Amino acid sequence: MPSIARSVMTIGLVLLVVGVASGSWGVYQQTADTCESGYGLTITKLEENETASPTAEHVAYSNLSATEQQVFQDILTAEETPIYQNSTPLEGLSEKVVTYQGEQYETSPLFVSDCANGWAIFKFWGSLIALLGGVIVITVFGWRRWH
């Protein structure tokens, strides 16, 4: 009988270690993930021989609202496309050709950046496996102590 208890204890310890490792990995990956959910659009400078989309509306920078001008500047000068929590400031800029400082810039359609986080499953299942392993270890330890 002691060999069965030892085997069950080993299984419990393995489950405990694997569960803690998986859960910790999930927590680490989730905190290290820099993805942002929200809305955005891109701006592309049109070259002289390049034509814009036929459906794009042509506007002058000065005809944009103050908010649209600020968003246009932010996107144009950003290293990476900024993500906005609210789509309202972007809707007026979507799918336009903006003439700015003698150059033409085409804006993309509005896109949604959705960060699906697959690491949460590691946290969830890691916690359950660690809990199961802990229960097994405590049960076997208690059973061995009282018998």
Image (spheres, rainbow, N blue to C red):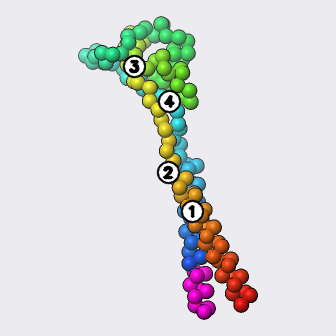
Q: Earlier in the sequence, mark 3 or mark 1?
A: 3
Asked if the residue at tag 1 contacts the one at tag 3, i.e. Cβ–Cβ closer than 8 Å, the answer is no
Q: Which mark is residue 39?
A: 4
Position of residue 128 relative to residue 121, above or below, is below
Mark 3, Cα crowd under 10 Å, few <14 / some 14-19 / many 20+, is many
- Mark yes or no: residue 120 visible: yes
Asked if the residue at tag 4 contacts the one at tag 3, i.e. Cβ–Cβ closer than 8 Å, the answer is no
Residue at the disc numbered 3? 95
Q: Position of residue 5 (x, y in %)?
A: 61, 86
Prevailing SS of the magenta stretch:
helix
Name which residue lies at 68% across and 82% down. Answer: 141
**Region in magenta:** 1-10
Mark 4, Cα crowd under 10 Å, few <14 / some 14-19 / many 20+, is many
Q: Amino acid at mark 2?
A: Gly
Residue 33 versus residue 55: which sits nearer the camera? 55
Name which residue lies at 47% across and 7% down. Answer: 63
Where does the N terminus fall, quadrant-wise?
bottom right
Position of residue 115 relative to residue 81, above or below, is below
Mark 4–mark 1 Cα distance, whole angstroms, equals: 33 Å
Q: Quadrant of residue 140?
A: bottom right
Mark 2–mark 4 Cα distance, whole angstroms, equals: 21 Å
Residue at the disc numbered 1? 126
Mark 3–mark 1 Cα distance, whole angstroms, equals: 45 Å
Residue 68 versus residue 88: which sits nearer the camera? 88
Position of residue 101 relative to residue 37, above or below, is above
Q: Earlier in the sequence, mark 2 or mark 1?
A: 2
Q: Earlier in the sequence, mark 3 or mark 4?
A: 4
Question: Would residue 101 appear left or right of 10 to someone viewing this image?
Answer: left
Residue at the disc numbered 2? 118
Q: Amino acid at mark 4?
A: Tyr
Q: Amino acid at mark 3?
A: Glu
